Image (cartoon, coloured by chain):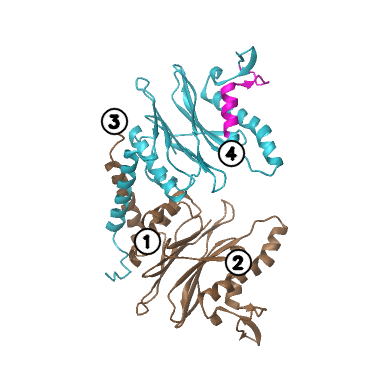
Chain colours: A cyan, B brown
Amino acid sequence: MTYCLGMLLHDGLVLIADTRTNAGVDNFSSFKKLHTLIDEPERQIFACTAGSLSMSQSVIGLIQEGLPAGAGGEPAGGLGGGEVTRSLRHATTMFRAAQLVGEAVQMANATVGRALAAINADAWVSILLGGRIGDAPPVLFLVYNAGNFIECTPEVPFLQIGETKYGKPILDRGLTFDTPLHEAVKFGFLSFDSAMRSNLGVARPLDLMAMPRDRTQPILERRIAEDDPYFDDLSARWARYLHQATESIPNPPWMDDPG
Amino acid sequence: MTYCLGMLLHDGLVLIADTRTNAGVDNFSSFKKLHTLIDEPERQIFACTAGSLSMSQSVIGLIQEGLPAGAGGEPAGGLGGGEVTRSLRHATTMFRAAQLVGEAVQMANATVGRALAAINADAWVSILLGGRIGDAPPVLFLVYNAGNFIECTPEVPFLQIGETKYGKPILDRGLTFDTPLHEAVKFGFLSFDSAMRSNLGVARPLDLMAMPRDRTQPILERRIAEDDPYFDDLSARWARYLHQATESIPNPPWMDDPG
């Protein structure tokens, strides 16, 4: 299993991904699921992947090596020995970037996905794609397994893939488009804390990327280790607060307190 | 959708069920999903149902009318015009009662379920069965769609059916076998509050049944209306506490606070 969360706020973009993968309950491992697709002065694009690991890696590989020049009319660039490809380097907008990633997902389905389907193995991939190109503000997309995608909007300022449900209530209650970036990171960690408690298939280390909308501030990339003291403290405090909150809510007036 | 929760604690048994049903998003309705199967001095048995409404009602109907006498060797009782049936009235233990309910589920699958499968309609049912017989303490079972079942144990003192995930983190964090009955009702309501916020298919009114282990105390049955003031207050307080808790957690030390 996997849990990845993207938050697009007034103050910027946050991506968080866990690193746990498993093939059955007896084969757990750890892989990076937050990928830096391109990091240049004029374009910074990141992706989080959920789904079959071989599908995810195929998609990321296709994007990084460039897709074959198709009928799409995208500008083509030379790569290596004059091979013509299309890549994120030539995408003029994040929308075009999402189209390219969607195409890569379709190509992975047509190759790896078809091979796995032939042996009745279920294979799928979904992707959070976030970043900015040129002077445009940061954008966040969710690319589905069919290659179609949706864009994150201020009304619900987050998108999730993988084990999404356990971590959703805390976001539904507290996160808004106006939540400051450092508060959003706290909300994100609390969301992961819930997901990790209720599903062993989600686990630290976590990878974090925070891109302030203000271009004078640097992009933050950080790994939250299994014994990260800040995360441990956040988790312990949260448990205490929840306990206090539950205790301080009055008892049902129509129920006897035997105590 | 549906959400039903059963909690088996040192102090007793609690069942909570919502009442929302829907056939597609354009056809919402309200049906009772917490059923009193039998309420006599020596046996009090309740069930919550999730799944296709026609399947659920078939199962409850079969249980209440009695199952045909089979090869099972259960004591048979007369019903109406001398027809021989087996019913919860004759179950000597809650384990036998769970077997009977499992059989009813299998019969509903063989009739209603088969008819629906013929038109490619997905049909299933799952049931929380809780109660007590004779001098035995309260017991809680989850009966699956195949008619098999599991029993709730003190290690994880709750079982859920339907839309289970959104409401699970709060229970995982706070509920233990030693949680007092009125505290458990609060935890249950907070679990429903989370599920209702994140899924429109779960909604008030809620039905509650609380059976104290102490037999000198009465069984509580109560409907929590859509405008129930206690639930409204609990929900508002919880939102406030979560907000305060999030704010009081320190910011990540490696992140600038622009404020």
Query: A202 left or right of B218?
Result: right
Residue at figure coordinates x 64%, y 78% from the top left: B72
* Mark 3 lies on residue: B257
Q: How far apart in space, not on screen, are marks 4 and 3 (Cα)?
A: 37 Å
Q: How many marks?
A: 4
Label 3 SS = loop
- On whether residue B165 falls in the magenta region, the answer is no
Q: Amino acid at mark 3?
A: Asp
Q: How far apart in space, not on screen, are marks 2 and 3 (Cα)?
A: 56 Å
Q: Which mark is residue B176?
A: 1
Q: Position of residue A135 (x, y in %)?
A: 44, 18
- Range of residues picked out in magenta: A56-74
Circles 2 and 4: CB atoms closer than 8 Å: no
Above or below B52: residue A56? above
* Mark 2 lies on residue: B147
Residue at figure coordinates x 61%, y 31% from the top left: A105
Q: How far apart in space, not on screen, are marks 1 and 3 (Cα)?
A: 38 Å
Q: Amino acid at mark 4?
A: Ser
Label 4 SS = loop
Q: Which is closer to the viewer, label 4 or label 3?
A: 4
- On whether residue A68 falls in the magenta region, the answer is yes
